[in-house]
Amino acid sequence: MTRTPSRAEPFVHPALFYRGDREYVEGTAPFVSDGLAAGEPVAVAAPAPRLELIKAELGARAADVRWIDMTQAGRNPGRIIASVLRSFADAHPGGHVRIIGEPIWPGRTSAEYPACVQHEALINEAFRGRDVTILCPYDARALSHDVIADAHATHPVVINQGTYGVSLAYDPEGVLARCNEKLRHPPGAAAIRFDAELLPVARDFAMGEARERGMTPARSQDLNLVVAELTTNSVVHGGGAGTLRIWAESEQIVCEVQDEGCLTDSLVGRRPVRPDQIGGRGLFLVHYVSDLVRVHTGEFGTTVRSYLARG
């Protein structure tokens, strides 16, 4: 049975390595039970089958836990911090909060995975100084060696077979630098240059290209929002102009905006938006409606790519 170690720092971010259902339950259910016994708010965000394992172990106490299907709420890793983790923690100020968050599971695509690793690295910055513990389970039997190595790099504490240890490979800044990889678009992507005067033209161009590629009207509304926010950001913050590209990839429409700006805030778009906030909502909204968002930024410009299911 695992127990939370004594916390010298208010924020704790351990990775839990499990092999099979029994180890999963033994590593997660006591974490939840201890929190409930202490009167602490507890949320569990994991794939639905994992939620059911913990619920079965808790029995009647499961009613006191906030349950979140991570395959839905966290399909885009870029919205997990704001819409899942911060949403729950911010709703319970003034005391210790416990969250189980499992953003990486077998079946994540090669396009999704770098965004997952970035998310895990950014949790440490997003919650620094907060009285929160976020336990992140990893299926050590099904996930690759590289994924487990990344878990060591993004979590200062690791739990293996009930034993807590300090991760000697902990290096979130190095992970963020490595995952800030250039995004290469296919040669046949439809493209248009835009500036302030051509913003409406760019939006119409994107809508037309998406319709030709089979995007439904309902999903086109999300694409319209993504294009409006990204192109406006380029005009206001990215040098006044940019390039919009759009193409189909499997069952998704991919929209990409490239400009000459540089993002210096690694958490931009990943913080909750205050009801009274004026401006600064663009990337938050893009993360919120997209199935996946990838970003590359550097001294020569920034590329933001949004993936949206066609239907």
Image: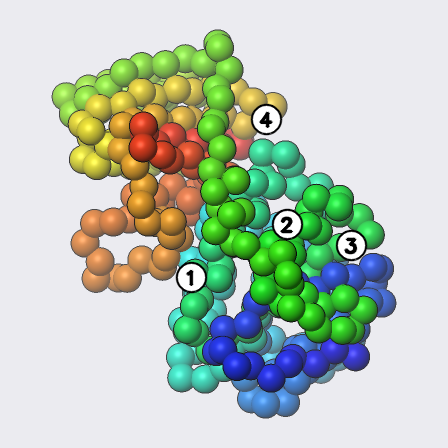
Where 243 sits versus 173, above or below? above
In the picture of the structure, the residue carrying the numbered disc 3 is 140
Tell me the kind of residue under disc 4. Glu
Query: Disc 4 and disc 1: Cα gap in Å?
Result: 32 Å
Could you tell me residue 3's position as x and y percent? 70, 81
Query: Disc 2 and disc 4: Cα gap in Å?
Result: 28 Å
Give the numbered dot on residue 251: 4
Answer with mark 2 or mark 4, whichever residue precedes in sequence. Answer: 2
Q: Which residue is drawn at 47% across and 69% down?
A: 88
Query: Disc 2 and disc 3: Cα gap in Å?
Result: 12 Å
Q: Which of marks 2 and 3 is in front?
A: 2
- Side of 308 relative to 94 (left or right): right
* Contact? badges 4 and 1 (CB < 8 Å): no
Q: Which residue is drawn at 63% across and 56% down?
A: 169
Tell me the kind of residue under disc 1. Ala
Answer with mark 4 or mark 1, whichever residue precedes in sequence. Answer: 1
Tell me the kind of residue under disc 3. Ala
Query: Disc 3 and disc 4: Cα gap in Å?
Result: 30 Å
Q: Nearer the viewer, mark 2 or mark 1?
A: 2
Give the numbered dot on residue 126: 1
Q: Which of marks 3 and 4 is in front?
A: 3
Where 143 sits versus 189, above or below? below
Where 140 sits versus 290, above or below? below
In the picture of the structure, the residue carrying the numbered disc 2 is 150
- Side of 276 relative to 37 (left or right): left
